[in-house]
Image (cartoon, rainbow, N blue to C red):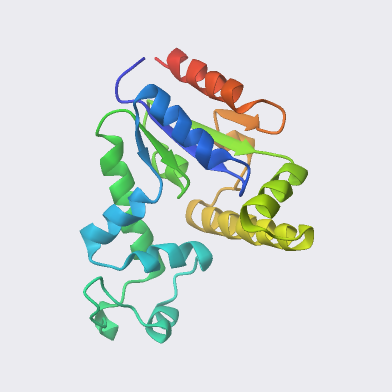
């Protein structure tokens, strides 16, 4: 397999995409980055990890919002008005981290607009994973001991946040097939076969 290969994984909420991405990384010996991206961005910038999570829930370049909510660093100090970072600047710190890590050998990135951030990279494969609503609802009910109606609401909210975050920062449509090299419906293929399909695709990349 070619060196310096990057796989980005975008996925619907609760489709099993996170687990599949980690399995692929383990089998190939690739470095795996999911929440590790946030931890590294927090360390680099001194901004608490909560604020990186927050921009995925409220993707807006709002200085007023940051001031009202209170912008705290990892050291617990309140940031003055002149020093407040907008959501866009926080996103940029995260994007810089992703670009830096992508230069350090073969790796897998999960979410966080990594497909868009690395769009100019030649050896980069972007995949989108999804599953039927029935399977996703069943997963949430089992994992969170939720009712069917509660599970539906959880999935709707999660997908809405991901779509809003992605569309805002990329000016693309989340889930649009033109953005990806490969799309898999995990309801129609066993996990082990899905892993084989993705690995086979990666092995064909020159």
Residue 124 seen in the current view: no
In the depicted view, which residue is nearer to us: 9 or 36?
36
Lateral position of residue 157 relative to residue 124, left or right: right
Please give the count of numbered marks on the rendered protein: 0
Residue 3 seen in the current view: yes
In the depicted view, which residue is nearer to us: 134 or 102?
134
Quarter of the image that includes the N terminus: top left
> At 54% across and 33% down in the image, what residue appears?
127
> At 22% across and 58% down in the image, what residue appears?
44
Lateral position of residue 41 relative to residue 194, left or right: left
Name which quarter of the figure residue 156 lies in: bottom right
> At 40% across and 29% down in the image, what residue appears?
26
Q: Position of residue 194 (x, y in %)?
A: 59, 25
Q: Is residue 108 above or below residue 144?
A: above
Q: Position of residue 165 (x, y in %)?
A: 53, 58
Quarter of the image that includes the C terminus: top left
Lateral position of residue 155 relative to residue 27, left or right: right
Q: Is residue 138 above or below residue 103?
A: below
């Amino acid at each position: 397999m070619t060196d310096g290969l990057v796989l980005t994984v975008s996925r619907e909420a609760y489709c099993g995409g996170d687990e599949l991405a980690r399995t692929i990384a383990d089998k190939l010996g690739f470095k795996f980055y999911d929440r590790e991206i946030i931890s590294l961005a927090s360390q680099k910038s001194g901004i608490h990890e909560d604020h990186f999570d927050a921009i995925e829930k409220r993707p807006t370049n709002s200085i007023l919002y940051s001031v009202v909510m209170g912008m705290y660093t990892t050291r617990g100090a309140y940031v003055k008005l002149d020093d407040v970072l907008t959501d866009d600047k926080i996103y940029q710190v995260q994007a810089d981290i992703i670009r830096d890590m992508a230069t350090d050998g073969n790796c897998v990135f999960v979410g966080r607009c990594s497909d868009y951030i690395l769009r100019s990279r030649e050896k980069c494969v972007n995949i989108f994973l999804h599953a039927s609503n029935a399977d996703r609802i069943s997963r949430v009910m089992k994992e969170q001991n939720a009712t069917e109606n509660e599970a539906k609401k959880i999935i709707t909210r999660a997908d809405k946040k991901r779509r809003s975050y992605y569309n805002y920062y990329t000016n693309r449509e989340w889930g649009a097939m033109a953005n990806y090299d490969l799309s898999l419906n995990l309801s129609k293929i066993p996990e082990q076969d899905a892993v084989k399909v993705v690995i086979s695709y990666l092995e064909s990349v020159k």
